[in-house]
Amino acid sequence: MSFLPFVAVDVETANLNNANICQLGIAVFDQGILTHKISTLVNPRTKFNPKFERLHGITRAHVTDAPTWEQVYPRCAHYLSNQIVLSHTLFDQEAIDKASARLGLDLIEPLAWVDTCRVARSVWPELRNHKLATLAECFGISYCAHDACDDARCAGEIFLRALSDSGLSMEQIIREHAAVDVSGWSATPIVLHSEPLGLNPQNDPMTPGQLLFCIIIAIIGLISFLAKLSG
């Protein structure tokens, strides 16, 4: 099976307004292989909802010195523009669009934006739900939930698994779920930006809350996966 290059993206937000992005994660895949990950905290210049802080472990104190969306936007556009972009639900697309529009920035225009949650529902309708954590547990994919970069990587891996299990080509999946014909697309290599202002090719160090959350999720996932194997 041949694979077109694609980019998986995920954001975390400070509160109910999804324009208030506080973390951006990007995972780049080429020929079905993860080639690099890019992550940054983002200062949304607003208050953080305590419920959201508990969810992803990021607080206002963590983003004090982080770049704003206006600073991160050019690099985000570099990776997403005219590319096949994936996210688990279209929440992330809406958040990026809203954060950009609020600042009067042009909306980023990928070649196609594919919702991996919708793809998962189509390929595995028998599953109890199609949340990213459920899919990761089901397929033995280790990841740290609500870390934007790891969420993006996991969405990319779920997409590759969906391609394998469905027997469909990328072109067919994208045509069905994004209504875009990419069969004649001339793919260009996705390279690291020469000036990664605000974007770190190595993941930003996790906050203590994120690290503890990831350890707990990893242990639960491992126990569940081993239980399935022994059953």
Image: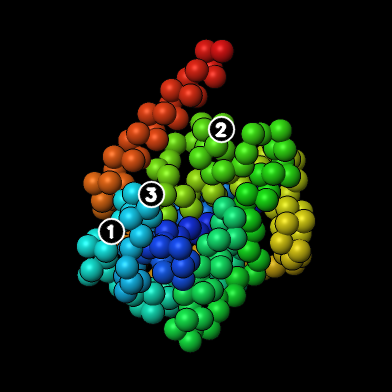
What residue appears at the point 53 percent right and 62 percent down from the top-left corner?
92
Front-lying residue, 184 or 57: 57
Q: Amino acid at mark 2?
A: Phe
Residue 7 rendering spot, x and y as whole percentages: 54, 59
Q: Secondary structure at mark 3?
A: helix
Residue position marked by numbered label 3 in the rendering? 55
Q: Is residue 136 left or right of residue 203?
A: right
Viewport quadrant of the N terminus: top right
For the residues labelled 3 and 1, the Cα–Cα distance comes to 10 Å
Q: Secondary structure at mark 2?
A: helix
Q: Residue tagged by mark 1?
A: 59
Q: Which mark is residue 38?
A: none
> Camera-side residue: 125 or 27?
125
Say few, some or many: other residues with alpha carbon within 10 Å of mark 1 (under 14 / 14 to 19 / 20 or more): some
Q: Between residues 181 and 52, which one lies in front from this camera angle?
A: 52
* Residue 154 placement (x, y as % from top left): 50, 46
Amino acid carrying label 1: it is Thr
Q: Is residue 30 visible?
A: no
Q: Nearer the viewer, mark 3 or mark 2?
A: 3
Q: Label for residue 139?
A: 2
Residue at 68% across, 51% down: 118
Say which amino acid is labelled 3. Leu
